[in-house]
Amino acid sequence: MSKHNAISKINDKSARIVVVGIGYVGLPLVVEFARAGYRVTGYDKDAGKVQLLNSGESYIGDIASQDLAPFVKRGLLSASSDPAVLKDADAVVVCVPTPLNKTKDPDMRFIVSATEEIAAHQHKGMLIVLESTTYPGTTREVLVPKLTRGYEIGKDVFVAFSPERVDPGNLRYNTRNTPKVIGGTTPSCLEVAQALYARIIDTVVPVTSTDSAEMVKLLENTFRAVNIALVNEVAMMSRRLGIDAWEVIRAAATKPFGYMPFFPGPGLGGHCIPVDPLYLSWKLRSLKFQARFIELADAVNSAMPEYVVSRVTDALNTHEKAVRGAKILIAGVAYKPDVSDVRESPAFDVISGLVRLGAQVNYVDPHVPEFDEAGSQMQSVSPFASFAEYDAVVIVTHHRAFDYERMLREAKLIVDTRDALRSVAGDRAKIATL
Ligand SMILES: NC(=O)c1ccc[n+]([C@@H]2O[C@H](COP(=O)([O-])OP(=O)(O)OC[C@H]3O[C@@H](n4cnc5c(N)ncnc54)[C@H](O)[C@@H]3O)[C@@H](O)[C@H]2O)c1
């Protein structure tokens, strides 16, 4: 009976929804639920985010304030730092962080504390969905035991896992038109979770278990990490062979089947690709299985910032300059183009590698006015400042906002780690690639 009640509340939109964690993943989700006509509350420990959301202001690039403010005004969307909001929730969606700890093992603190808070306010008919990226078995081993005290899963409460696939900065794919995979603890759990997501997502893709849904996300991100490592190594091989790696990759991509292009770069960044595959290899180690592709990809990708430093050293050398004392400008510190997110950005390792060798380093990033990372604080120089005063400019992130023509005209030397200058006219002898 509880299942039918839960589904009918979802279908008639009387279900109250709470999203736990309103960051890059949770905020787009609360907006989508409000757009579909649900009353939704974002619950977050970060009082700053709660205050901004309640005043109708977005703090994430992909969401415009004018897209969420009307829902706040109509009383459909609100935020709170009080876990008591969970008490009235019919559906709870958990989007808390899943970082690594210092030894590169999963840090499950946020999932555990969020689950304990939900368990303290749990009631019959509640649907709980975990969206945070995590190792296979998390929902079954970490959530379910905490949510079964006095409740039968699949009858009294419903527990599911549905990986988030948000791609910040992607103008084509958003929450609604990106298909969503869902696995339930029981068939009833899957049914209730599918009913909820079908209201806000065009295509839902059911799988047979929460473990399987967890593994889907890790396969997707491991696929990216391994393929990026492969092309990073292809870039190094091509340098030895005197071949243009980007030309090769683009030409290979004309094959209409069986190939998909990935591009080399200064190393992995962001909250997902450098981190998520290590959740999988950690889990496999406990089962005495060595995830060799993941470990190799991690080793290749983690070495890329140091490789960039060596390319800068070589390029300066051809201009009869030493790194020590050289003035170097890093162009772009966000982890990918056209976003302001600097989490795990390889730019920090490139900067610290150059500083260690005695360079004087500045950076320019129109999306990141300042940062405080890995013990160093820096402020961006003006995007309009001249490039001519630097011995070398290193393109780490290929933002569209950069004026590449002016950069090529003014700079003495450019190390382009992203092939950003491919079609820019000018003195190409100044350009060094990976
Ligand atoms: N950012 C992405 O592009 C992306 C894409 C796909 C999947 N993911 C995954 O989604 C999850 C969330 O990532 P994110 O980028 O949104 O993280 P985020 O850091 O932007 O947001 C997480 C929020 O959760 C809050 N929080 C932490 N513990 C809490 C608790 N116990 N109760 C309430 N709030 C709590 C934090 O204050 C923060 O605001 C991670 O597992 C991540 O791997 C992220």
Image (cartoon, rainbow, N blue to C red):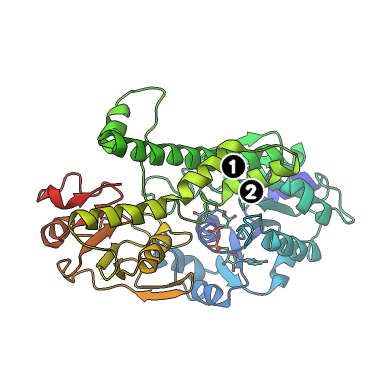
**Residue positioned 33% across, 57% down in the render:** 338
> Residue at label 1?
218
> Who comes first in sequence, dot 1 or dot 2?
1
Disc 1/disc 2 C-alpha distance (Å): 8 Å
Whether 278 is drawn above or below 116: the answer is: above
Direction from residue 269 to residue 322 in the image, left or right:
left
What's the residue type where badge 1 is placed? Leu
Q: Say which quarter of the image contains residue 335.
A: bottom left
Give the crowd class for mark 1: few <14, some 14-19, many >=20 residues within 10 Å.
many
Direction from residue 160 to residue 19 in the image, left or right:
left
Of 148 and 123, the residue lying toward us: 148
Report the disc number at residue 239. Answer: none
Q: Nearer the viewer, mark 1 or mark 2?
A: 2
**Residue positioned 83% across, 50% down in the render:** 156
Of 390 and 58, the residue lying toward us: 390
Which image quadrant: the N terminus?
top right
Report the disc number at residue 279. Answer: 2
Q: Position of residue 348 (x, y in %)?
A: 42, 63
Q: Quadrant of ligand 1?
A: bottom right
Whether 25 is drawn above or below 155: the answer is: below
Q: Position of residue 312 (x, y in %)?
A: 29, 56
What's the residue type where badge 2 is placed? Tyr
Q: Which element type, helix, strand or loop, lies under badge 2?
A: helix
Q: Are marks 1 and 2 in contact (CB under 8 Å)?
A: yes
Give the crowd class for mark 2: few <14, some 14-19, many >=20 residues within 10 Å.
many
Q: Which element type, helix, strand or loop, lies under badge 1?
A: helix
Q: Residue furthest right?
A: 150
Total labels: the figure holds: 2
**Residue positioned 66% across, 54% down in the render:** 105
